[in-house]
Structure formats: C-alpha cells, structure tokens
Image: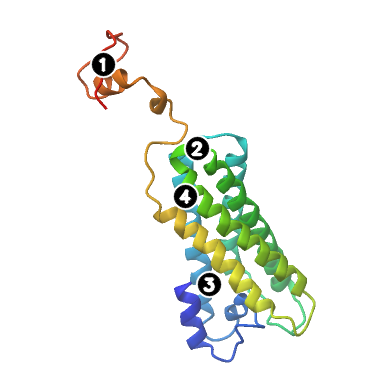
Amino acid sequence: MAIDVLLRFLRPGYSLIYNAESDYGRGPWFWVMDLNFLLRCALSVAVVASLYRAVRVGGPFRAGLVFLAIWAVCSGLLAFFADDVEGQPLRGSGVVHLGLAFIAFVCVGIGTILVSVSLRSDPAWRRAGTVLLAVSLAGAAAFLLLGSATGHKHAPGGLYERIFLGLELLWIAGRGLHRHGPIAGDPARRRPAYLTKYQFSGLMPRGSTPHRLPVSR
C-alpha cells in the first residue's frame, strides 16, 4: 500500500475515486506499479507458505490456500500485461489484464474467508481467526460494491477497488505479523503432559513407555 501512496504523488492526474489502481501501469512511472504487483505476489506466496507450515487442518483450509496461491500468481502476472486506462478501448494486453485481475480478486476473496473460518476452528488460532474473518468479510462486501460499479461511468469504482485491496492486503499483512504458538493440528499438542515433559526434553528415549508421573502445571 505504501507504493500506492507513492504513485498518488507521482501521478496526481489520476483520480483515487474513479481510476483503477492498474491505470498507473501505463505512462510515466509504470515500472513502480509493476514492482507493486510483483511485491504483492511475493508477500502473498510467503504468507501461503507460512500458513501451510504452521497449520494442519482439513479440506476447506487447504482449498483456501489454493485460492490464495492463485491470487498470488495472477497478481504477479499483472505486471506483464498493462491495462487500458479508463475510457480507452480494450486491446489485447488490457483484456488479459482484466481477466487476471478478476481471477485474482475472486480467489483472494474466497481464499481469505475459507482460511479464516478454518483458523477459528482451532483453539490456538481462534482469536486471530475471528479478526481475520471480520476483515475478509468486509473485503467481500467491498468486492460486491466494486462489481455493482462496473459499467457505470460515474460510479466510484476506483474507490471501491482500493477499499477491497486495502482490506485483503490488511488480511495478508495481519496473518504475516501474527505470532502463533504450537502448530495447529499437531498431534504433539494432544500428547499427555508426562510424555511432553520427559520425551521432548531429551530425558527419555523416543519410543519408550514411562510410568505415569504427576506433572505440576
């Protein structure tokens, strides 16, 4: 988002309310917008990889990660297909750009909701999952507003798009900054306390069966 703020000062002629974010990809300083797309891709891939390592839950969660991975790839590809500025006829590159953007937006909207719902089902992530779910649902509402503005010349589509992207990037940044505890779904979290204390401290060989001892908590 910092790059979006920078582009606002570099290209003051574009409206934050009516122009799409991708319009910065045409004309002077286009490479800054391309860098923005690539950084967004890299950040999203890092978050997907982090979630894959940190959380081990069921199908909806993994489906959400797939959607987020598609969002990441499409976001990166946008750097190579410039859009056509608002009001200009669509050409080949602009058509591809719109297609990639639509796929990316739908996937990040679905992916963040699926992952958030799955995180709420795990006690270690319930509080963070609740916050992330609220952000993702707000993003979905902004996406619906963006859809309703499509094709309407005087609708504030640029504003709706920026709200949507801001919320989705807030979700991604919030997940990246969240410091989690034990791996969700890890069988070690469900081991008896006496196994956890002795076996994992290295005082007892793996595979041996100790006498059950009281453990102070």
Of pointers 1 and 3, the one earlier in the residue sequence: 3
The residue at 61%/62% (across/down) is 138
Q: Are marks 4 and 1 in contact (CB under 8 Å)?
A: no
Q: Nearer the viewer, residue 102 or 159?
A: 159
From the top left corner, tell me how far across and down residue 213 is, in percent.
25, 13
Return the x and y of residue 17 as percentages of the image width and height.
64, 83
Left or right: residue 46 compared with residue 163:
left
The amino acid marked with disc number 3 is: Asp
In the rendered structure, which disc, 2 or 1, sits on the residue that comes first in sequence?
Answer: 2
- Dot 1: what SS? loop
Q: Which residue is mark 1?
A: 214
Tag 2 and tag 1, C-beta contact below 8 Å? no
Please tell me whether mark 3 or mark 2 is closer to you in this view.
Answer: 2
For residue 128, the mark is 4
Label 2 packing within 10 angstroms: few (<14), some (14-19), many (20+): some
Q: Can the viewer see residue 67 in this picture? A: no
Q: CA distance from mark 3 to mark 2?
A: 38 Å
Would you name the residue on which mark 3 appears?
A: 34
**Label 4 – label 1 distance at C-alpha:** 33 Å
Q: Nearer the viewer, residue 174 or 99?
A: 174
Residue 67's label in the rendered image is none
Q: Give the Cα separation between the discs numbered 2 and 4.
A: 10 Å
Pointer 2 residue: 122
